[in-house]
Image (tube, helix red, strand yellow):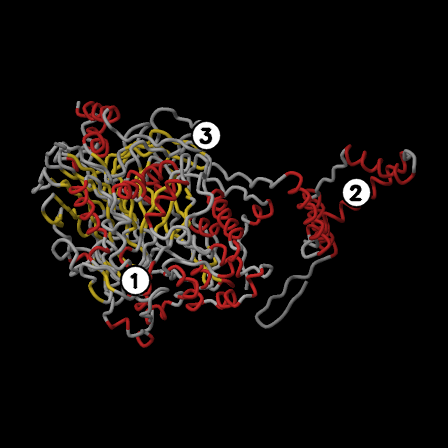
Amino acid sequence: MRRAALLAIALAACARGGPVPPERTEERAACADRNPLRSPYFGDLHVHTGLSFDARANGVQTLPRDAYRFARGEAVDVLPGGALTVKLDRPLDFAAVTDHAELYGEVSLCQDPAAPAYATETCATYRSGGFGATSAFGSLLGDVPPMRLPICAGGACAPAAASVWRSIQDAAEEAYDRSSACAFTSFVAYEYSAAPGLANLHRNVIFRNAAVQGAPTSYFEAFTPASLWRKLDAECKPPCEVVVIPHNSNLSNGRMFDIESAENGGAASAELRARLEVLVEVFQHKGDSECANGLMTGIGAPDELCDFEKIPGEEDCGAGTGEGGLAGVGCWSGRDFVRTALALGIDHQARHGVNPLKLGIIASTDTHNGTPGATDEATYPGHFGEGDRDPTRRLESTTVPPGALAFSPGGLAGVWAEENTRDAIFEALRRRETFGTSGPRIAVRMFAGADLPADLCARPDMVELGYAKGVPMGGDLPERGAAPAFVVSALADRTPLERVQIVKGTARPGSAPAVEVFDLRPPASQGFATDPETCAASGAGEMSTCDVWRDPSFDPAAHAFYYARVVERPTCRWSAARCAALPPAARPRACTGGAVPALIRERAWTSPVWASPPKP
Amino acid sequence: MERTSSGGYAAPPMGAFGRFLLVAAVVFAVDRAISFARAEIHVSADVERALAADLEAKLGRAPAPAELAGAVDRWIDDEVLYREAKARHLDEGDPVIRRRLIQSMRVLVETQGVPPSPPPPPELRVDLEHLFFRSAPPADWRARAERGELLGEAFPLGRTLTGKRVAWLRATFGDAFAEAVMSAEPSGASRTSAGVPATRPTAVGSSASTSANASGAWAGPIASPYGWHLVRVTRRKEAPAPAAPSAAPSAALALRARYRVTRR
């Protein structure tokens, strides 16, 4: 009897707002493991190879083809002569190579003995490699406005850049599994690398399918993010479709989430931004961008779990902004962090009717080794070629990138999609049914809705009911004015889970936005433990969780967002694992100095669900 | 035969008849071994036609039967030498042979495109339903599950898993789960779409508390990292394995992509 009722509910789900299958925009076989109720897929949407100026300057020889082979589980030689060979222990489901679009041609010509540019001092300096070469080319991307190098005079770099762009597209096509096995999905992509004053405004640009721009839009063509959005809007028309993903807001000196300036503050710009920038990279190699404590423009009470993989600025920007974030200098701001941005977004919506910061969440690595998904702390091989391949030197380094003690292996992007195809994963990205992790493959799922039953975790039809009676993460709650319930269900990866939380933000006209953090269950403290000296783990704990929570202070007149944070029990950071592997006498000062914690709590963040008051 | 040494042994002397028997036995064994191992050289009609055409081109007339027989005999000698040389790997490292093979492959690629990689063997995929429990299911689970009264708890991946590879099941749920699924009898059709027998004859044996099932019945309880599962396999079939990266625009590049180049 109950079974028949469940079947009826499932059928009703399909009839009344169950998952909508992805539109098919390309020729390919149907997937053998297609799941209309969606499965989790893990990938990396921020990957550099030797085509990026800074990776090549650090000796990286991998190309996009190698990066995709690596993602599919093959070993690759990052450095010449087998000096650094890396292999994933688990293949990824999808990846996008996002080489810096700015200097494709320059890097190519400087390595081509047949090119006239090869013999120039500029190219000789570049080929000398290391920090000097990285700075020589990288500083161009901090200039306002940016100017191309003299070796590109007369458009000399354009043909070489076009050839690089073609090779990136070819590599993505070769790696894409169009068979029914659907083993791997690749995306054509690039990184727009504007950093005026070295304040980071970088964005990754991910295309849905093989229909892409004729040439990527770099900082040399678009001096501001708004001009990037406008160029994409003009040049990427169907069948070309695109999403834009900002990253490292933590190094933007208060500038990444600007929604008030003349350039970004207008309604047209806000709407265009909301349409293209549907996601944000919350975590990667160069630190966590979720939240930070103690900054003037931060929102909400101190949150102990915000003290995680931080790269602090020199001072608080206060209400202003600064410069130098990518060089490890300048101020940092509460507005550098995603939690604040989400609150500013709903505040803007409350005041102006549009939310320009309606950001779903992913994470990725930002590897510059062409090694997507290499996030394991214990085997972290560095992410910057020669610059950080020596782990002991990495422990002793306090410099800015590449490779200081404060950096980490980075994170992963997760999506809930019907199948592992470009169409299905791209649509998951665009509807924000995504999550990010700090490295482990934690699969977390959240649904929200006023009509979700309280006993959802005790029922096998949680997924069907979630779609039928609620919305998945990334969605908008119906404007009904009733207090929503949330179900958060997670599968741990290799480490038990410690806690499950919901972060809630609210905004209403006439008052400042607010943020609260709710524990959905008491934090686990027994059973599992990691020895910070040896990194040995012992004991057991919760490997799967499911919790239902109803907002106790729901204000139907306020705009709100809710995202879930699932946190693992403490395990060794890469630096502690490296220290444990060294004989005590060989351990550098960082092993005992306390500059970074020995133990960290890896985690996953879901995209938010948004609530809006009923329209009058 | 006699060997002596400190700590050695002394064999009894062998007579002439004994030596004769021993030699005969060795000759017989070698002959049998050679006859069993003798490889066939087949002189096909195509070979004979090619030899005749070659002779005709050299002689300016059709070859006489004896001339053709002589050519065939020389071809057989050459074939024997060729095969013996191959068996001894004399072709390896020979720069002339390497150059010749490169030329042949280049012609092949340029005239016919990149030869496709050999297709990977098909792999097994499984459709299943599972009932999930965070703690062990009740003792009377089987009867209640068969009656549809035991439905399990919420699981984020859902109740139905479709087209899953065994490697995925192993990585996600562990070895015991994968083994149990591979041993379970599918409900519905007993053969795959490819006509391969759908089940293995062995029963589940990974855990004392785990029981195998009859066709289409629930099996379990099976422990995974997440809890306990009752499992019913609904279909098992062979499906194409993942495709290798497809051809690059350049034929030589496409072939090269199949290799990993290392330098020391």
Q: Taking A196 as reference, is A495 left or right?
A: left
Which residue position is annotated with label 3? B196
Which amino acid does the dot numbered 1 rest on? Answer: Gly
Q: Position of residue B34 (x, y in %)?
A: 70, 46
Residue type at the position of mark 2: Ile
Amino acid carrying label 3: it is: Val
Q: Quadrant of the C terminus of chain B?
A: bottom right
Question: Relative to the observer, which residue lies in front, A280 or A548?
Answer: A280
Mark pair 2, 3: CA separation: 44 Å
SS state under label 2: helix
Regarding residue B124, the answer to whether it shows in the image is: yes
Q: Quadrant of the N terminus of chain B?
A: bottom right
Q: What is the x, y in percent for residue A512?
A: 11, 49
**In this rendering, which labeled residue sits more in front, label 1 or label 3?**
1
Query: Along the horizontal axis of the image, is B175 left or right of A333?
Result: right
Q: Is residue A29 left or right of residue B58?
A: left
Q: Considering only order in the chain, which callout, 3 or 2, is on the residue closer to the N terminus?
A: 2
Residue topped by disc 1: A325
Residue B135 appears in the picture as rendered: no
